[in-house]
């Protein structure tokens, strides 16, 4: 069923994605600053080695690794708050 609130679900998804990216970027920038290094603390999960499918004339390589950090989580929370304010 479609949402009747008038807000677009794609806009929410894009704001959350931008919160993840900006939060991860901020966490990466603050990793060398002693009192902000906790922002880069997180966990990576996914495929360690990519899956290779050799079809003879074409080779496909699949791989996915996701790193979730404290700054990424904070970025998602801020994005959701901003989305609700719009």
Image: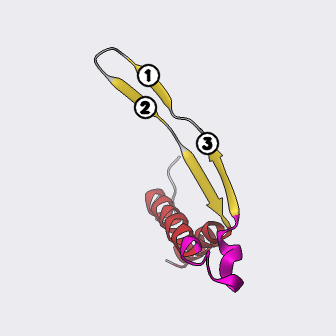
Residue 11 is one of the magenta-drawn residues: no
| Figure coloring | secondary structure
Measured Cα–Cα span from mark 3 to mark 1: 18 Å
Q: Say left or right for 29 vs 39.
A: left
Seen as rendered, the residue at the extreme left is 57
Given contact means CB atoms under 8 Å apart, are the residues at marks 3 and 1 in contact? no
Given contact means CB atoms under 8 Å apart, are the residues at marks 3 and 2 in contact? no
Dot 3 or dot 1: first in sequence order is 3
Q: Which residue is mark 2?
A: 61
Measured Cα–Cα span from mark 2 to mark 1: 6 Å
**Camera-nearest residue between 37 and 6:** 37
Identify the residue at horizontal 59%, vertical 78% (top origin): 30
Instruction: Please provide percent x and percent y for residue 40.
Output: 65, 69
Identify the residue at horizontal 60%, vertical 67% (top origin): 72
Q: Main secondary structure of the magenta part?
A: helix
**Picture quadrant of residue 49:** top right
Given contact means CB atoms under 8 Å apart, are the residues at marks 2 and 1 in contact? yes
Measured Cα–Cα span from mark 3 to mark 2: 14 Å
Instruction: Please provide percent x and percent y for residue 29.
Output: 54, 76
Residue 37 is one of the magenta-drawn residues: yes
Q: Which residue is mark 3?
A: 46
Query: Is disc 3 surrounded by few (<14), some (14 to 19) or many (20+) residues within 10 Å?
Result: few
Seen as rendered, the residue at the extreme top is 56
Label 1 sits on a secondary structure element that is: strand
Label 3 sits on a secondary structure element that is: strand
Instruction: Please provide percent x and percent y for residue 34.
Output: 69, 83
Counting every numbered tag in the picture gives 3
Magenta residues?
A: 27-41
Identify the residue at horizontal 71%, vertical 75% (top origin): 38
Q: Say left or right for 70 vs 10.
A: right
The vertical placement of 1 against 62, above or below, is below
């Amino acid at each position: 069923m479609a949402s009747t609130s008038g807000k677009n679900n794609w806009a929410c998804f894009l704001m959350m994605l931008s919160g993840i990216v900006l939060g991860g970027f901020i966490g990466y920038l603050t990793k060398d600053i002693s009192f902000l290094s906790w922002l880069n603390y997180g966990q990576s999960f996914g495929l360690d080695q990519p899956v290779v499918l050799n079809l003879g004339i074409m080779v496909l390589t699949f791989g996915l690794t996701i790193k979730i950090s404290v700054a990424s989580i904070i970025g998602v929370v801020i994005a959701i708050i901003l989305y609700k304010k719009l």
